[in-house]
């Protein structure tokens, strides 16, 4: 706060200039803000957590233990003193305090203001003076046989009615005195409990104030430490500028680059598959051609043998086989049109090695973070030096803030606590003596009550209405004696007790009307706020504010648990918006980044030669003629040498020459063996070849679209890189810088809220004031007022108690002189006349 109030009346510490400078340096170190728009894409800039408020102990409760009496006593004091607090009179007394004698006019005003207390005091003085005098003369009068002292009671017809009247009036009066006596006991105990608990409650109140005074520097340190954390976070981000900024730049390229690389990967995979099918097809063709060459050789050999056999002269009917022999195929070779060109195109694509092209591009973009780190090394170093300067500025803040004043106040409160602990044994002994004296007073009043009650009990119990006054029983006579004892004790002690009532009334009543009641309704704060009442108590000018701050305003704000920023009107002294702006640091960092260009070399995704080769590959993939291959396969599959073999067997049967017959049968058998080889070897190979060719065809049908997609995506990606790389680097660099500056923006907003809404919530100060009021007024003063009110209550009702007790005692005591009164008519019995009949 920059100020400290000593309990010994020391003046305010510090000056307005020192206070303003200290708070200004604090807020300058806490701000670190830059007026740039916040970047929602920067999730790391999270506001710090709210300050942890200290935990305070529970203060004194309002209940004093005599709440049943407080309203009655306050109503009585309000009647005695209905006037408000005399501010003008008090001010005049304070100003004239140095004079040895008060002005007569001031004294007259004091007497007029205290007229209610003076009237009550006059009544008390009359009571104190008259009660012993009346008691003395009454005793002398009764000793002379007057004033009811003669042991004679005239018997009349209304004696019983008068006795009952005096009995019930004495009973009611005694009950009222007993109620007041019970209130005396209870209020006396309440005073004792209040005094005994006052040490604990005061220590708790002082402890809360010390917790508040300790929490304020801690909260300031938390805010300063949070600024350290912000600077350190930005410094770490600058050290990691390569991974952070480079990754963001890479992400901007992903949208266009990933589809291109994905299509190239698909093409590479399809090329690999095509290569596998081409190799498999080539192997199948070679195997098929080998098998077909072997079959062709066997067919040619068997055909030549058949021609030799058929050309022999003794071969019967062989000429009809010449036409059938011509149907046997002589050329069954198998080729695929354009297959070699397609295979060479596949080989060229494999030489391109698309995987290496993809790897080259990926390595280029993976190297962007390192390129960013290398290109921004100087900028980062300069920015870190600026941040070190900010950190150094912050480290000097706590040295410029007058937090030592709070420490001095805390030390003073600790001294007060020690002094309270020192005087507590003395206070406890004094309180014990007070309590014992008050218990004696209560017991004396209780003695009067007991005497009256014994008289009221024994008198009726021992009284026989028809008995002569001189023959009344012993219990009845004791009852009358107890009533006279109660009256005697009342005369003996009442005037002394009234002195106690008068002293406590003047003390407690004036404390309530001049301190507690104005404290409760706020008049006391208004009096303290009066200019000139307390020299040097001008908080506003002391802090350098334009307006003064009253104690009542501070109490009201602290009652609402407001912060020191609001309570002390620091917004008049400090332009928080201006102090939360240190753009001179951030502008330098911005300028450093704007002057530094991050250069990324151009990269060619696919060279023109590669793109041309991919186009040739796509065209040749579509030139494979599968129709001719299928027709060739159908022709081979339709060969059937078994038919020719059967016809040869038919000719062999009609031969007469066994040698020719045997030769023809052997040749027919050879043809069937060749047909079996065709069916078991050539036909499966043809089916395998057909399956491979179909699979290859299903892939080559898509290759044209795949290559077209690759060329389109790569072209779009290449154009995007050529045109937008520099702009992306600049944009992402600015976003990264704004992201770092956003740390300061978030922190500055947090500082603004923390200073204005959290730092130094002064609720414990108002709580301490309320606790002192509760301890002093609600507990001690109210209990004290309840005690003297109860005692005075008993003393007032002692008067009718004395009168009715003395009057009633004569109806129970045994008289020395008799007085007969017969209220009965004695009737003699007259016998009725009786007639005799003889």
Image (cartoon, rainbow, N blue to C red):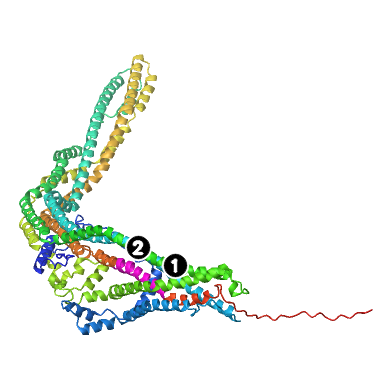
Using a 10 Å C-alpha cutoff, classify the residue at mark 2 as few (fewer than 14 neighbours), some (14 to 19) or many (20 or more).
Answer: many
The reply to whether callout 2 and callout 1 are in contact (CB within 8 Å) is no
Tell me the residue at 53%/68% (across/down).
478
Magenta stretch encompasses residue 787:
yes
Chief secondary structure of the magenta portion: helix
Report the residue that reaches farthest toward the top: 658
Q: Which residue is mark 1?
A: 446
Q: Secondary structure at mark 2?
A: helix
Tell me the residue at 23%/39% (across/down).
273
Mark 2 or mark 1, earlier in chain = 2
For the record, the magenta segment spans: 773-795
Q: Which residue is mark 2?
A: 192
Residue 441 percent coordinates (x, y): 39, 67
Q: Is residue 718 visible?
A: no
Which one is in front, 524 or 218?
A: 524
Tag nearer the camera, 2 or 1: 1
The image quarter in which residue 349 lies: top left
């Amino acid at each position: 706060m920059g100020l400290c109030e000593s309990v010994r009346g020391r003046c305010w510490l510090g000056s307005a200039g020192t206070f303003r400078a200290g708070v200004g340096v604090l807020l300058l170190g806490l701000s670190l803000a830059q007026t740039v728009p916040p970047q929602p894409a920067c999730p790391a800039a999270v506001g710090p957590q709210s300050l942890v408020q200290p935990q305070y102990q529970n203060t004194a409760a309002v209940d004093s233990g005599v709440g049943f009496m407080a309203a009655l006593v306050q109503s009585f004091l309000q009647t005695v003193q209905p006037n408000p607090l005399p501010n003008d009179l008090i001010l005049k007394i304070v100003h004239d305090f140095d004079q040895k004698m008060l002005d007569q006019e001031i004294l007259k005003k004091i007497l007029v203001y205290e007229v209610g207390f003076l009237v009550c005091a006059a009544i008390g003085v009359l009571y104190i003076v008259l009660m012993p005098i009346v008691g003395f003369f009454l005793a002398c009068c009764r000793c002379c046989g007057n004033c009811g002292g003669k042991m004679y009671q005239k018997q009349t017809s209304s004696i019983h009615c008068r006795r009952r009247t005096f009995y019930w009036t004495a009973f009611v009066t005694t009950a009222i005195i007993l109620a007041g006596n019970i209130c005396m006991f209870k209020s006396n105990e309440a005073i004792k409990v209040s005094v005994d608990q006052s040490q604990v409650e005061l220590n708790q109140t002082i402890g809360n104030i010390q917790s508040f005074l300790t929490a304020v520097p801690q909260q300031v340190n938390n805010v300063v430490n949070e600024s350290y954390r912000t600077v350190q976070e930005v410094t770490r981000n600058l050290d990691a500028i390569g991974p952070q900024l480079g990754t963001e730049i890479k992400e901007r390229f992903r949208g266009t680059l990933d589809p291109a690389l994905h299509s190239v990967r698909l093409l590479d995979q399809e090329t690999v598959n095509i290569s596998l099918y081409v190799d498999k097809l080539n192997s199948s063709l070679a195997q098929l051609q080998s098998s077909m060459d072997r079959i062709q050789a066997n067919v040619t050999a068997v055909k030549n043998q058949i021609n030799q056999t058929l050309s022999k002269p003794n071969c019967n009917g062989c000429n009809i086989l010449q036409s059938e022999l011509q149907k046997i195929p002589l050329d069954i070779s198998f080729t695929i049109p354009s297959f070699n060109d397609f295979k060479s195109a596949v080989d060229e694509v494999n030489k391109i090695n698309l995987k290496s092209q993809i790897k080259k591009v990926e390595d280029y973009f993976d190297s962007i973070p390192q390129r960013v780190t290398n290109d921004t090394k100087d900028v980062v170093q300069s920015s870190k030096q600026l941040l070190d300067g900010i950190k150094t500025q912050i480290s000097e803040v706590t040295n410029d803030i007058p937090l030592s004043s709070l420490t001095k106040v805390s030390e003073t409160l600790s001294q007060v606590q020690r002094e309270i602990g020192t005087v507590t044994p003395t206070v406890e002994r004094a309180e014990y003596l007070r309590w014992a004296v008050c218990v004696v007073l209560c017991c004396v009043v209780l003695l009067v009550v007991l005497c009256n009650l014994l008289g009221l009990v024994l008198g009726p119990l021992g009284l026989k209405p028809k008995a002569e006054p001189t023959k009344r029983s012993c219990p009845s006579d004791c009852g009358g004696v107890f009533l006279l004892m109660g009256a005697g004790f009342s005369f003996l002690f009442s005037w002394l007790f009234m002195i106690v009532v008068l002293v406590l009334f003047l003390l407690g009543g004036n404390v309530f009307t001049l301190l507690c009641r104005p404290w409760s309704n706020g008049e006391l704060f208004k009096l303290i706020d009066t200019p000139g009442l307390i020299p040097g108590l001008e908080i506003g000018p002391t802090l350098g504010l334009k307006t003064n701050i009253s104690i009542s305003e501070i109490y009201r704000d602290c009652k609402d648990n407001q912060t020191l920023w609001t309570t002390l009107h620091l917004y008049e002294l400090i332009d928080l918006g201006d102090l939360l702006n240190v753009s001179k640091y951030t502008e330098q960092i911005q300028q450093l980044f704007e002057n530094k260009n991050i250069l990324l070399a151009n990269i060619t995704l696919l060279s023109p030669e590669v793109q041309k080769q991919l186009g040739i590959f796509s065209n040749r993939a579509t030139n494979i003629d599968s129709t001719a291959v299928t027709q060739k396969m159908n022709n081979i599959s339709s060969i059937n040498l078994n038919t020719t073999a059967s016809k040869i067997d038919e000719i062999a049967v009609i031969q007469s020459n066994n040698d020719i017959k045997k030769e023809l049968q052997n040749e027919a058998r050879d043809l069937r063996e060749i047909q079996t080889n065709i069916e078991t070897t050539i036909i499966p190979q043809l089916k395998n070849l057909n399956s491979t060719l179909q699979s290859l065809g299903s892939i080559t049908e898509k290759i044209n679209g795949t290559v077209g997609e690759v060329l389109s995506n790569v072209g779009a990606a290449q154009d995007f890189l050529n045109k937008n790389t520099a702009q992306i680097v600049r944009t992402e660099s600015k976003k990264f810088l704004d992201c770092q500056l956003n740390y300061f923006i978030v922190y500055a907003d947090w500082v603004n809220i923390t200073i204005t809404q959290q730092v130094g919530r002064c609720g414990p100060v108002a709580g301490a004031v309320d606790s002192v009021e509760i301890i002093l007024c609600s507990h001690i003063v109210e209990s004290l007022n309840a005690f003297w009110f109860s005692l005075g209550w008993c003393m007032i009702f002692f008067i009718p108690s004395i009168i009715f007790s003395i009057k009633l005692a004569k109806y129970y005591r045994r008289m020395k002189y008799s007085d007969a009164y017969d209220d009965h008519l004695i009737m003699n019995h007259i016998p009725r006349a009786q007639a005799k009949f003889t």
